[in-house]
């Protein structure tokens, strides 16, 4: 009986190209993700630099001269109420980001917790959660949001309440998606091997399954942020937002109320509209790009 | 000394739907006893649908029997708790068929070895753990520096399966369930892996239940054989007599269809009756 | 039925009579351009095959056997590229055909049954519909009656009941599905059939049944069959000739009797002696070392790091393919003088 001897030839290690090169090559294949990220980063820089340079008080009425067209002093012009639109844009974007991240984060967190619990433990827990999700999903979200926002006392509507109104009916999607993914993962053989290695249920969830779901969770998060930002936008445009704040949708609502276009103050609604298109566009591109990353079947080959 | 493993009249039935008239009997009244002081290598042979995978799942505690019980060292495995349960987990291990599926793609291949070391406290320090891993990997013919730190997709199927066997060597279980360990591995590597399993048995007294449909390798590795057909045991005995002189007609058909790599041992003395009417596995 | 009198069949019988090979592969080269470098997947592979002969192609994963099949079918996708060589099937060089010509040649001249084919049957289409699809894409003018006749003939050739025509894939067992794939492969009576691991997921009895089917089918249409696999036992039981591939190169081609009783290349020898038989119970002779990565092939002969007869020459010089007096092909320096 021969002994097993390892005698592989002394090969030079296969040269792996640097991580940066591989990353750039990936972005070249997944252009949507790259473009989306670039736009988002540009918007973030604008907001951050803006917050540092602009006086946020000027985003509120009666701060500066009214109805000024764009100029060097007021790059985005000013509006009917005496708000410096540059300041308004900066503060508005920041507030949109806050709503997006809080609502998006909360929605994703609920989705992850409920999705994992439901899938891993099965039985009546799973049935309950799943049924609740399935009952709530067909409810027309826009309608409920409008009703809730409309029935609140004007003073109670703040950034935080906006975020909560949005999350209220947004968490079912991520829950069901993550549940589906965990159900599949749970049957994979590496989970069985982990059990054989003495790993307990909680550790299996956090250490074995969760890391593999990070791309899905990231994609769900971006999707949630998108929905949150979009919802805050249309609620504000309808005049249901926190009216004092310079949320982008609010600016447009105010502009429309004052008949901005008819009066020749074209700069007033244009800036927030373009900003919103860029925000939603970049989020959508990132979402699609992450989808491709998370789902290898969709992944393009070279 | 008592019995290492005692399977008493275990039946496993799968119901389809709530109102079942479509019950599938995966395993029927299966019994087996393996003594603690007589380690052996036993083969369970059968085609897909014979119940061999069900048996593996039952022995590993992943599913429970519909009737009957499975005793590990005298205790029913479904009622084990606490330190007894940990001991059972530690002493009953498996090598699975698919070399890729057992690895968590998020981690390097080291994860497969480091996790059980940590959970079962097999090493006194990081250095000790590393030494044990190196020892196990070398014993299966791998160079630790070639495979550690790599991700599963960066290694070949043969390397991955050898790491699986290294894990078994590291753990030195009492009972090893090997479910088709070489069927997804190239012919040239099978000998290496089978030899490792045999060494595990010979040098460390591990009892191995080798589950397969490939009778050539079964003949080489096992002492005794049990042949399953659709959940029933059709023949059992020591592997020499069963293969050279099969009694049951199904075993005869099975043995006759073995593709021996020997031109003077052609298959085909028994014709295959039409198997069209048999339901899908 | 007029299928038996088609010119192709007549031509094939003639070629068998004169002994000219129906398949001739000459210096086929395939390279993969990956992020990590260039890999020579096929390195000047050449061999011939007569009609009515079955050749088994063995080798480890990564040796190039599946790549060879795909290259012959011109189904290599980027980042892989066919960079040279010819594939002559019954007088036509497949590499010289245009896209449309090659599409027609696939299935009608040369058929490929891929690995796991039985799992690639469309689950929502009846078997019959899938067979008709295959025929229609090659013979658009064929009448419904002729199409049906062809399908029935194919199903009968693989010992399946005609009722299978109306069934869905999930209603069939693994062995039956595999035979359906073979039936689809022979619908247009190709001259060459390539089957890639057709029985790897099947149990021994079903495997035997499928191999006996391939035998019968081959007798019916007198095709040349290439069976890609790594089960040497299966090769011994069913093949006429065996080809061994290593690291993208064809290292030995011999009749099955010779391969199993007197293999010439050191790799083939190691492979044969590692096989478990009824007589060598308990002996395990594995091949030490690992197959090389195609990205970093050893210099000279690719097998030299694991070869017990390695010499300075084999470390530096790639061996040519030698034709030995008995007709075998061996790519090894040990036989350089004999050719």
Image (spheres, rainbow, N blue to C red):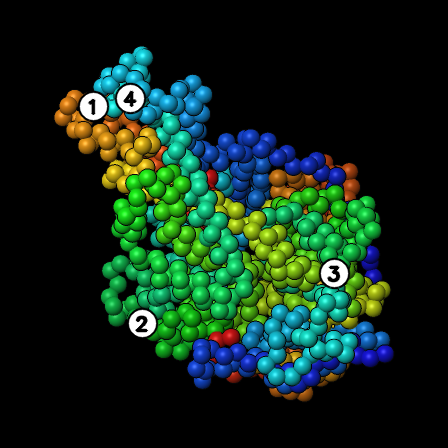
Q: Are marks 3 and 2 on the same chain?
A: no
SS class, disc 3: helix
Quadrant housing residue A120: bottom right
The residue lying at 59 percent from left, 50 percent from top is B105
For the question of whether residue B111 can be seen, the reply is: yes
Contact, mark 3 vs mark 4 (Cβ under 8 Å): no
Q: Secondary structure at mark 2?
A: helix
Check whether the beta carbons of the residues at disc 1 and disc 4 lie within 8 A of each other: no
Q: Could you tell whether B98 is left or right of C134 in the image?
A: right
Please identify the residue farthest to the top as the structure is shown: A72
Please give the residue where the numbered disc 1 appears in the rendered image.
Answer: A266
Mark 2 closeness class: few <14, some 14–19, many ≥20 residues within 10 Å: few
Q: Is residue B31 above or below residue C73?
A: below
Which of pointers 3 and 4 indicates the residue nearer the eye?
4
> Is A56 located above or below residue C21 in the figure?
above
Residue extending furthest left?
Answer: A262
Tell me the CA gap for discs 1 and 3.
74 Å
Give the residue at x 39% y 33%.
Answer: A95
- Chain containing mark 1: A
Q: Is residue C309 left or right of residue A107?
A: right
Q: Chain of mark 4?
A: A
- Quickly name the residue at label 3: B168
Distance, label 4 to label 2, CA atoms, is: 88 Å
The earlier-in-sequence mark between 1 and 4 is: 4
**In whole angstroms, how far apart are the C-alphas of marks 3 and 2?**
56 Å
Q: Which residue is mark 2?
A: C149
Q: Are marks 2 and 1 in contact (CB under 8 Å)?
A: no
């Amino acid at each position: 009986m021969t002994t097993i001897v390892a005698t592989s030839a002394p090969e030079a290690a296969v040269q792996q190209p640097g991580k940066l090169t591989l990353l750039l090559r990936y972005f070249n294949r997944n252009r949507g993700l790259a473009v989306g990220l670039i736009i988002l980063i540009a918007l973030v820089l604008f907001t951050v630099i803006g917050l540092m340079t602009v006086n946020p008080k000027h985003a509120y009425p009666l701060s500066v001269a009214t109805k000024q067209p764009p100029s060097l002093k007021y790059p985005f012009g000013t509006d009917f109420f005496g708000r410096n639109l540059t300041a308004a844009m900066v503060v508005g974007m920041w507030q949109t980001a806050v709503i997006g991240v809080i609502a998006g984060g909360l929605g994703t967190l609920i989705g992850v917790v409920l999705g994992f619990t439901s899938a891993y433990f099965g039985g009546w827990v799973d049935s309950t959660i799943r049924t609740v999700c399935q009952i709530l999903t067909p409810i027309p979200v826009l309608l409920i949001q409008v009703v809730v926002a409309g029935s609140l006392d004007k003073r109670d509507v703040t950034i935080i309440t906006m975020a909560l109104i949005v999350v209220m009916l947004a968490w079912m999607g991520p829950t069901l998606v993550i549940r589906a993914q965990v159900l599949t993962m749970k049957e994979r053989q590496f989970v069985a091997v982990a059990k054989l290695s003495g790993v307990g249920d909680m550790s299996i969830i956090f250490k074995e399954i969760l890391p593999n779901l990070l791309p899905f969770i990231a994609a769900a998060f971006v999707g949630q942020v998108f929905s949150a930002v979009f919802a805050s936008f249309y609620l504000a445009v309808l005049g249901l937002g926190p009216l004092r704040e310079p949320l982008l949708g609010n600016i447009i609502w105010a502009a429309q109320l004052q008949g901005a276009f008819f009066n020749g103050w074209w700069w007033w609604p244009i800036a927030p509209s373009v900003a919103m298109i860029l925000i939603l566009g970049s989020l959508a591109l990132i979402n699609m790009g992450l989808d491709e990353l998370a789902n290898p079947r969709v992944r393009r080959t070279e | 000394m008592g019995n290492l493993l005692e399977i008493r009249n275990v039946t496993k039935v799968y119901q389809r739907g709530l109102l079942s008239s479509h019950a599938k009997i995966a395993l029927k009244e299966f019994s087996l006893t393996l003594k603690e002081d007589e380690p052996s290598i036993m083969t369970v042979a059968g085609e897909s649908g014979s119940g061999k995978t069900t048996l593996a799942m039952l022995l590993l505690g992943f599913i429970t029997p519909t009737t009957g019980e499975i005793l590990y060292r005298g205790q029913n495995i479904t009622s084990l708790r606490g330190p007894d349960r940990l001991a059972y987990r530690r002493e009953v291990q498996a090598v699975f068929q698919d070399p890729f599926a057992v690895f968590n793609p998020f981690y390097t291949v080291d994860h497969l070895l480091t996790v059980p070391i940590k959970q079962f406290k097999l090493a006194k320090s990081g250095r000790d753990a590393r030494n044990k891993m190196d020892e196990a990997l070398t014993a299966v013919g791998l160079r630790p520096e070639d495979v550690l730190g790599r991700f599963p997709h960066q290694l070949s199927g043969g390397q991955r399966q050898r790491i699986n066997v290294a894990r078994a060597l590291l753990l030195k279980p009492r009972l090893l369930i090997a479910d088709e360990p070489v069927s997804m591995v190239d012919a040239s590597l099978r000998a290496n892996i089978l030899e490792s399993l045999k060494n595990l048995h010979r040098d460390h007294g591990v009892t191995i239940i080798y589950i397969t449909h490939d009778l050539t390798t079964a003949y080489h590795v096992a002492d005794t054989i049990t042949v399953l057909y659709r959940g029933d045991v059709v023949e059992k005995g020591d592997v020499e007599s069963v293969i050279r002189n099969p009694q049951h007609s199904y075993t005869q058909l099975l043995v006759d269809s073995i593709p021996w790599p020997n031109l003077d041992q052609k298959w085909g003395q028994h014709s295959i009756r039409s198997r069209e009417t048999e339901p899908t596995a | 039925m007029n299928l038996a009198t088609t010119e192709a069949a007549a031509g094939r019988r003639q070629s068998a009579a004169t002994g000219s090979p129906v398949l001739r592969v000459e210096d086929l080269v395939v390279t993969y351009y990956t992020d990590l470098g260039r890999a020579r997947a096929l390195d000047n592979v050449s061999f011939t095959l007569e009609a009515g002969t079955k050749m088994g192609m063995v080798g480890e994963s990564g040796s190039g056997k599946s790549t060879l099949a795909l290259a012959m079918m011109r189904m290599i996708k980027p980042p892989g590229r066919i960079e040279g060589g010819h594939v002559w099937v019954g007088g036509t060089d497949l590499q010289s055909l245009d896209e449309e010509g090659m599409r027609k040649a696939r299935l009608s001249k040369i058929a490929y049954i891929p690995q796991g084919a039985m799992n690639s049957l469309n689950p929502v289409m009846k078997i019959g519909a899938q067979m008709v699809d295959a025929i229609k894409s090659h013979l658009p003018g064929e009448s419904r009656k002729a199409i049906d006749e062809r399908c029935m003939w194919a199903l009968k050739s693989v010992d399946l009941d005609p009722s299978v025509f109306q069934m869905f894939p999930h209603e069939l067992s693994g062995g039956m599905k595999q035979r359906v794939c073979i039936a689809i492969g022979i619908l247009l009576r190709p001259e060459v059939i390539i089957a890639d691991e057709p029985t790897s997921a099947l149990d021994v009895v079903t495997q035997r049944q499928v191999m006996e089917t391939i035998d019968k089918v081959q007798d019916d249409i007198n095709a040349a069959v290439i069976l890609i696999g790594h089960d040497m036992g299966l090769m011994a039981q069913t093949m006429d000739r065996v080809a061994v591939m290593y690291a993208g190169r064809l290292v030995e081609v011999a009749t099955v009797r010779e391969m199993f009783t007197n293999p010439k290349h050191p790799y083939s020898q190691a492979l044969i002696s590692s096989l478990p038989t009824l007589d060598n119970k308990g002996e395990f002779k594995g091949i030490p070392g690992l197959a090389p990565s195609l990205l970093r092939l050893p210099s000279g002969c690719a097998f030299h790091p694991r070869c017990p007869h390695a010499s300075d020459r084999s470390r530096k010089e790639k061996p040519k393919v030698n034709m030995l007096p008995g007709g075998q092909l061996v790519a090894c320096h040990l036989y350089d003088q004999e050719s």
